Image (cartoon, helix red, strand yellow):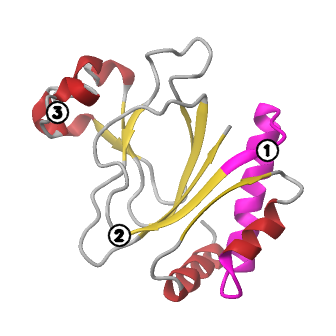
Amino acid sequence: LSAELKHSVKDFLASKQKFQTSMTVTPENALASIRQALGPDGSCVLSENIAELVDMFCYLFGLKRAGLRLTVLDKAMCPKFHVDKVPCRLITTYEGAATEWLHHQDVNREKLGAGSKGQPDHLSGLYKHQDDIERLNCGDVALLKGERWEGNENAGLVHRSPAILAGERRLVLTLDF
């Protein structure tokens, strides 16, 4: 993230203790829609970055519109490893710890969801070693193939939200088909 964008994110988080918005946007209306959702305290630089990601995501996949979710989190949104039931999801973390994921070969998929029998991920047998867990960096833009990507059935990227320490917050953007 550029210094200007980091500053914009810090300003936004200082003015918004809690924030969540979900909307459907097109490349043509994304900037105006995002600026309206962020309100008068919303940063131009943050809005412009999000609109640029919408434009690239839609162009890459030939989409006329995308589902956008921007959320300030003070706890893990999805604390257990899982797969998404979408073709592909763009995710980026503007502030805080970023998404954790596992390589396909390091996952026992039988232990996902109900297969964990209610046990936490580290005890369920889903993965063997703590070192198997990879983490995106803050500012990385990732495309996560989901279960509904044609030819990728039962092979979506296994990922989760990271634990958040007390007093910390994350600002996370996702885009979906």
> Disc 1 marks which residue?
65
Q: Residues within 10 Å of mark 3 (few under 14, many from 20)?
A: few
Q: Are marks 1 and 3 in contact (CB under 8 Å)?
A: no
Q: Which mark is residue 75?
A: none
Q: Are marks 1 and 2 in contact (CB under 8 Å)?
A: no
* Residue 148 visible in the picture: yes
Question: Which residue is more in the foreground, 59 or 74?
Answer: 74
Q: Is residue 123 left or right of residue 171?
A: left
The image shows a total of numbered marks equal to: 3
Q: Is residue 141 left or right of residue 162?
A: right
Q: CA distance from mark 1 to mark 3?
A: 40 Å
> Disc 3 marks which residue?
129
Q: CA distance from mark 2 to mark 3?
A: 27 Å
Residue 15 at x, y percent in the picture? 54, 88
Residue drawn at (58%, 81%) of the image: 12
Residue drawn at (76%, 60%) of the image: 51
Q: CA distance from mark 1 to mark 2?
A: 29 Å
Q: Is residue 50 magenta?
A: yes
N-terminal label among 1 and 2: 1
Residue type, mark 3 in image: His
Residue 19 at x, y percent in the picture? 52, 73
Q: Is residue 35 left or right of residue 89?
A: right
* Residue 141 visible in the picture: no
N-terminal label among 1 and 3: 1
Q: Residues within 10 Å of mark 2 (few under 14, many from 20)?
A: some
Residue 5 at x, y percent in the picture? 64, 74
Q: Which mark is residue 74?
A: 2
Residue type, mark 2 in image: Asp
Does dot 2 land on a helix, a strand or a loop? loop
Question: Which residue is more in the foreground, 62 or 132?
Answer: 62
